[in-house]
Image: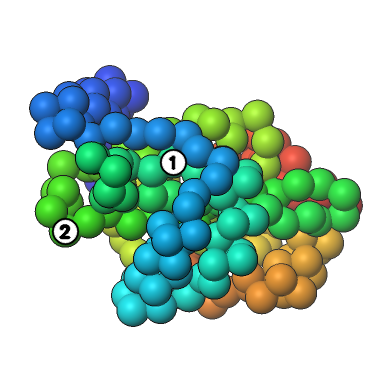
């Protein structure tokens, strides 16, 4: 089994950051985006099978939580958001809507955006509901832990079902950060 060390992850992320610098790409943490940008992102989410459809109003709410965008000369070439859920008085943030423009794919920029938002939410409950093996690998590289429904509290499973986030564990995997992992079985 291949394992990735912290040093290897750090090296990959540094290379991605150097690529951004060389290409003139900026990574920005923003809390608000223009309506035009939100409309483009919403249309993209509807057109691409890898993204779940997100309307403009929902994107506005997600942006208010803080989102990272990859930008060059005023144009967005990548983004990642979080969706805020409330589970019995606890805020749970779901990493969502990761996208990198084809022009800049294969340079680990998706991993870089995932790392930025994972670090930003390190002191609160962060979850990733992922389907693709690449995202599973990225989650593991970033220190997130794969958890099964059996490891979650009954209350959390019930809330996931209410939110429409209860997924088939053969096709989807749940990953949580260390903060969430510490309390996932006891969440009431």
Q: Are marks 1 and 2 in contact (CB under 8 Å)?
A: no
Residue at 44% from the left image edge and 41% from the top image edge: 68
Secondary structure at badge 1 equals strand
Residue at 62% from the left image edge and 46% from the top image edge: 64
Question: Looking at the picture, how far across and down is residue 159, in whole percent?
Answer: 78, 66
Give residue 37's quadrant in the image: bottom left
Secondary structure at badge 2 equals helix
Relative placement, left or right, of 113 versus 91 is left
In front here: 85 or 56? 56
In the rendered view of the protein, which quadrant contains the N terminus?
Answer: top left
Residue at 32% from the left image edge and 75% from the top image edge: 48
Residue tagged by mark 1?
68
Q: State the CA–CA distance, disc 1 to disc 2.
A: 18 Å
What is the number of the mark on residue 102? 2
Label 2 neighbour load within 10 Å: few <14, some 14-19, many 20+: few
What is the number of the mark on residue 91? none
Residue 87 higher or lower than 131, as above or below: above
In front here: 180 or 96? 96
Any part of residue 142 in sight? no
Its colouring scheme is: rainbow
Q: Furthest residue to the top? A: 7
In front here: 109 or 149? 109
Residue at 35% from the left image edge and 70% from the top image edge: 44
Question: Looking at the picture, how far across and down is residue 130, in whole percent?
Answer: 45, 62
Question: Looking at the picture, how far across and down is residue 170, in whole percent?
Answer: 46, 74
Question: Looking at the picture, how far across and down is residue 7, in whole percent?
Answer: 28, 20
Any part of residue 166 in sight? yes
Q: Sequence-wise, which precedes: disc 1 or disc 2?
A: 1
Label 1 neighbour load within 10 Å: few <14, some 14-19, many 20+: many
Relative placement, left or right, of 145 versus 85 is left
């Amino acid at each position: 089994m291949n394992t990735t060390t912290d040093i290897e992850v750090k090296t990959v992320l540094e290379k991605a950051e150097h690529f951004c610098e060389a290409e003139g790409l900026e990574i920005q943490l923003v809390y608000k985006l223009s309506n035009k940008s939100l409309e483009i992102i919403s249309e993209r989410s509807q057109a691409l099978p890898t993204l779940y459809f997100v309307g403009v109003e929902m994107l506005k709410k997600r942006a208010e939580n803080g989102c990272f965008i990859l930008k060059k000369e005023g144009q967005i070439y990548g983004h990642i958001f979080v969706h805020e859920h409330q589970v019995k008085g606890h805020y749970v943030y779901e990493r969502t809507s990761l996208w990198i423009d084809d022009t800049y794919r294969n340079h680990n920029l998706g991993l870089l955006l995932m790392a930025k938002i994972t670090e930003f939410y390190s002191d609160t409950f962060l979850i990733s509901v992922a389907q693709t093996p690449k995202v599973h690998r990225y989650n593991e590289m970033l220190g997130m832990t794969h958890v099964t429904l059996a490891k979650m509290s009954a209350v959390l499973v019930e809330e996931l079902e209410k939110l429409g986030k209860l997924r088939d564990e053969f096709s989807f995997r749940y990953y949580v950060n260390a903060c969430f992992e510490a309390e996932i079985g006891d969440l009431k």
